Amino acid sequence: ILTLAWCLWFHTNLFVWKQTDAPVAVIVDQADRFLKEWQDAPTVFSRVQCVPSGRSNSRVTWEKPADGWVKCNVDTVISSTSSGSFAAIVRDHTGSFIRGCLGTALTVWEVQMAELMAIRMTLSWLKTLNFGKVIFESDCGDVIDAYNSSRHDLSEFRLVLQDCLTPFGGLNEWLRRLTSS
């Protein structure tokens, strides 16, 4: 029922803002597909645990955060059509799913900038949820290294990084999921 309600809301917005109309059968089919994809997610997730790095094909396993902390995994994808999207998943110290969010961007930057903007949008979302202790995991080593670096320069990336993270002072624990260098 929730997937159908979401699809109805989504298509109502499309109609209001873009005057795009969809038949009821298309909306119901989209809701069914969305539900099936959600139900299949654990199976898909178990197949993609092995993340290749530049130097080796090591298996990466997710580790639970300490008690009182939550862990937020953020990842971004840029398609061949130059559109981008991201997903963030928050889990507690038992490994249980707490919340998740998805986002899209019409403007796509370089991979590092896309990852940084995904983290920025996720930080904004997390701030509304009042999580106090958050550990971030990302497979974009360049972003993690830049955050942990004491180097101060005037590059666009560094300025955006500082701009993105300044309002979120309490959310500053970062972990690196993958060594990509």
Image: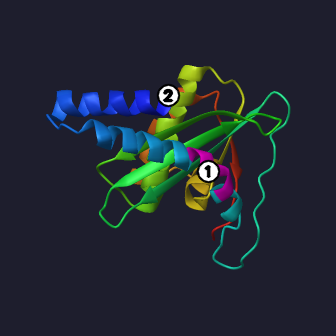
Please check the rendered image and state whether residue 118 is part of the magenta-colored stretch, yes or no: no
Residue at 46% in and 58% down: 77
Residue placed furthest toward the front:
25
Q: Disc 2 on helix, strand or loop?
A: loop
Distance between mark 1 and mark 2 Cα atoms:
18 Å
Q: Position of residue 168 (x, y in %)?
A: 56, 29
What residue type is disc 2 on? Ile
Q: Type of residue at label 1?
A: Ala
The image position of residue 181, as x and y in percent, is 63, 71
Work out which residue is located at the far bottom of the displayed protein and give it: 55
Q: Does residue 124 lie above or below 75 as drawn?
A: above
Left or right: residue 133 versus residue 34 is right
Identify the residue under disc 2.
1
Marks 1 and 2: which is nearer the front?
Answer: 2
Q: Earlier in the sequence, mark 1 or mark 2?
A: 2
The colour style of the image is rainbow
Is 42 included in the stretch rendered in magenta? yes
| Residue 153 seen by the camera | no
Q: Residue at x 26, y 28 (%)?
A: 12
| Residue 157 image offset from top left, x and y in percent | 43, 52
Chief secondary structure of the magenta span? helix
Q: Residue at horizontal 54%, vertical 47%?
A: 36
* Whether residue 140 can be seen here: yes
Asked if residue 67 lies left or right of residue 58, the reply is right
Q: Which residue is mark 1?
A: 41
Total labels drawn: 2
Q: Quadrant of residue 95?
A: top right
Segment colored magenta: 38-43
Question: Residue at 30% across / 43% down in the picture?
Answer: 26
